[in-house]
Amino acid sequence: MIIHIVQSGETIDSIAETYDVPVDRLIVENGIQTPDNLAVGQTIVIIYPLQTYTIQDGDTLTSIAESQNVSLMQLLRNNPYLSDREYIYPGETIVISYDTEKVGTFATSGYAYSFFSMDILRKTLPFLTYLTVFNYRATIDGEIIDIDDQEVVNTAKAYGVAPMMLVSTISEYGVGSSEVAFAILNSPDIQDRLIDNIMDIIKRKGYYGLNVYYQFLKPENQELVENFIIKISLRLKSEGYRFLVTVTPRINIEGASMDFERIDYTTIAQYTDGILFLSYDWGYSYGPPTSVTPVNVALEVLNYILTMIPPDKIFQGLPVIGYDWKLPYIPGYTVANAITSDAAVQLAADMGVPIIYSEIAQAPYFFYNDPDLHIVWFKDARSIDTIIRIVPRYGLQGTSIWNIMHFFAQMWFIINNTFDIKKVENLNNVENLDNVENLDNVENLDNVENLDNF
């Protein structure tokens, strides 16, 4: 794998010529939105195909997968644009495999709301082990605010992805309710009612298990949280369901100094199948201008966590939301707006400013004026490659991604060519896509009219 950093004066054509790859392949595989206007400092990933296949008359994706001795999921991972298609056509060339040596197998967990675009969902599912559906909200009396998620759950299972029900006290604005959490943790009756409601939804909608989110777990409430986790775990395990917990460590970054709340996670680890350490970030941020969970900070937290949790129970967080701050930054007043990595690159290109890379944070950033001075931090190919390689380095279970509602092509391209994606067992309809819209009986049609959009 080559990660090319765009230099001044380079174009997509000159880069393609340098590496002897087709221009359209660079564009598609990297999800480049403005190929005629690259940003200096932008990353472009180059991986050469090892085996390709030219589609013939009568081929379907299933028949190609069988003839090439690969899974349908592998075809979709190597050619994600096919998920946008209703048909394939004779003469098209698709990638069967890439010329890479994968470093192992790991699990991916992605978070998304139930109103996830189904087109993006179908494109993303081949890369996932778990899909955590956000957000069932617990009320103060142990009831659960329902969400419309049945199509998402069914589609995930059809792609061999385990749908996980997430329960929290977080509102649609990303604010957790300490009042609701306190009421639940201090009342066995409310806990029992909440667990009964959770089990009802899991069974009724076909979830694979539960993911409970704890925002800023504190020493003063730790024992109550542990008791509740034990109670949930025993109920879930008795009925054969999987149990994950998502934790956001309380991290304080001031200038060059960093500190975090040191919690003993030993008991939580004993009663769960995995702990996902991840900073949840929303459409805004009041925090200081910096990368979301810089790698140096993530490693310091991880080294502490590993003193009490087996590494194969840990998911390394991968937040892929960037932020745009107006400067000067005023604590408690300045609000940064969320931005995707692709949008950040496009903004840098439009503004004609170079992208800089922080070796300490392992994250890119840039400044622009419009008309006030702004700073934007986000994630690129270098960031992704660094973070996911933490997994085999420490023997972790995998990575948890917040969030996947935007298809970050470059991220999935790197993950797909670095690891084999782990799939769970005992899911109904694994790799049976007969009931999934736009993928049933995908075939080529020689004389189809009105295909201008293909």
Image: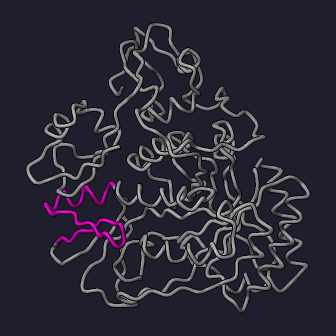
Outermost residue, left side: 9
Q: Which residue is at 23% across, 75% downward?
A: 374
Quadrant for the C terminus in the image: top left
Q: Position of residue 218 (x, y in %)?
A: 66, 87
**In the image, 154: left or right of 58?**
right
Q: Is residue 161 above or below residue 113?
A: above
Report x, y in % for residue 18: 17, 37
Horizontal placement of 83 versus 206: left or right? Answer: left
Quarter-of-image position of residue 244? bottom right
Residue 234 falls inside the magenta stretch: no
Looking at the rendered image, the quarter that the N terminus falls into is: top left
- Give how far across and how far down residue 390 sits, in percent: 50, 61
Which residue appears at 76% of the width and 61% of the height? 243
153 or 453: nearer the viewer: 153
Q: Is residue 356 a member of the stretch shown in magenta?
A: yes
The colour mode here is: one colour
Give the residue drawn at x 19%, y 51%: 6
Whether residue 348 is situated above or below residue 80 in the rendered picture: below
Looking at the rendered structure, the number of numbered marks drawn on it comes to 0
Query: In the image shown, does 260 or 103 lie closer to the viewer?
Result: 103
**With 34 as the anchor, is 211 left or right in this view?**
right
At a point 16% along the width and 73% down the height, the residue shown is: 369
Residue 443 coordinates in the image, percent (x, y): 51, 16
- To which quarter of the image does residue 242 belong? bottom right
Q: Which residues are magenta?
A: 342-368
- Residue 118, placed above or below residue 98: below
